[in-house]
Amino acid sequence: FFAASCTSLKGPHSIVKLPTADMASEAWSVAASQTAQRTYNPIRAIVDTMNLQPNPEKELIPLSIGDPTAFPNLPPAATAVQAVVDKLTGGKNNGYPQSIGYADSRAAIAKFCTSPSAPLEAKDVIIASGCSGAIDLAISVLADPGKNILIPRPGFSLYKTISTSKGIETRSYNLLPEKSWEIDLKHLESLVDDKTAAIIVTNPSNPCGSVFSAEHIKEILEVAHRLRVPIIADEVYEKMVFTGVEYHSFAELSTEVPILACGGIAKRFVVPGWRIGWVLIHDRNDAFKATVRQGLVQLSQLILGANSFVQAALPALLETPASYMQGNMAHIQAAAMACYEGLVKVPGLTPVMPQGAMYIMVGIDMGQFKDFADDRDFCQKLLTEQSVFCLPAQIFEYPNYFRIVTTVPLDKMSTAVARITEFCDAHRK
């Protein structure tokens, strides 16, 4: 019967080779997919090869990871926690949600993010697994393998990780530290060709802590409009700005350019582990109507929806009082000021004062020091000697800088600045 069955299996699905005794004795060898082999996270590639042994005589001060929960000084709002607890214990959100998110949750996000010049409805919102999941959706829906997208330098490394994994080329446009990290628009424009699928912008910025002015955003939008390239706006740090700084979303200043804006609750609500993000579809001139809207729905079905009970809590969570976020930003601004004012006095270091988010970038004049091969070496020695851990900006494709996270308690920031000063004094020529 078996032989007859094998004989009858003709065509593309026929059995062409049966295991033999010799094959059974061979060692297993299973190759990873090309997608897996292309996937590369520069943070892990650099940090995992560093000698991460802090000085045992000094308390470790980690200024490296962009996780606002690393210290207990910025807890989530009690109202947000209660909103999630209520949904978890209520027992009504244990099943699969709609892949794009619950309708009332999407309506709550639309209400939270809408503005008079960029109105939103529930149909314009796709809920994702964190803002990183939203960025993945936005890149995936706009770019095919062989296309390219433009990303900032310095910039969040995940843009390249996601794109390269999918066979999409990234081209890095320069940010200008002497102009508070504005985009070099001439350089950006020079990178665009007929295969450019999108421009990614980050505002406020990780890793720079910069906030674009309305005038600069309009300049960026003019370039995108003229070249007919849509924008992916990473706005997960939306409205996280310092006193006296105005925040403007890209969509509220655009009448022509189609924009996919990515956001989430991770940073503003200090809950990155809750994994809720979103894509906002700002569809100027129905540019996304034909295929992009439906494409986002189809891509959302790959994971069958984000966390059910956290997204169910969004209508209440997003009503967190503004005073909670204002208090958090007052602390972050105070820590950033302490860092900047301390390090600007250190010969050989050039901090760039941030305007928001939760980071500050610091330049290193290698010519003033005797012992450092590069920014990675600087950060490694700083950790082993002073137990202060900062990220080398090689990770963001910007050598001879390092990034400091500004969500740490003020006393620890002051201690870190004193140690960095001592460290630089010890290694100066």
Image (cartoon, helix red, strand yellow):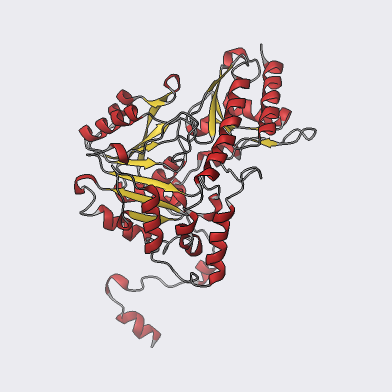
* Residue 406, image quadrant: top right
The C terminus appears in which quarter of the rendering?
Answer: top right
Residue 243 position in % (x across, y down): 49, 30
Tell me if I can see residue 302 in this picture. Answer: no
Tell me if I can see residue 11 in this picture. Answer: yes
Residue 395 position in % (x across, y down): 52, 34
Residue 61 lies left or right of residue 373; in this view the side is right
Residue at 31% x, 72% y: name it: 13
Residue 264 lies left or right of residue 272; in this view the side is left
Residue 122 position in % (x across, y down): 33, 57
- Seen from the viewer's position, the closer of residues 197 and 256 is 256
Seen as rendered, the residue at the extreme right is 57
Residue 131 position in % (x across, y down): 45, 48
* Residue 231, image quadrant: top left
- Seen from the viewer's position, the closer of residues 131 and 323 is 323
Residue at 51% x, 58% y: name it: 29
Would you place residue 276 above or below residue 231 in this image?
below
- Seen from the viewer's position, the closer of residues 92 and 262 is 92
Would you place residue 345 above or below residue 56 in this image?
above
Residue 243 lies left or right of residue 195; in this view the side is right
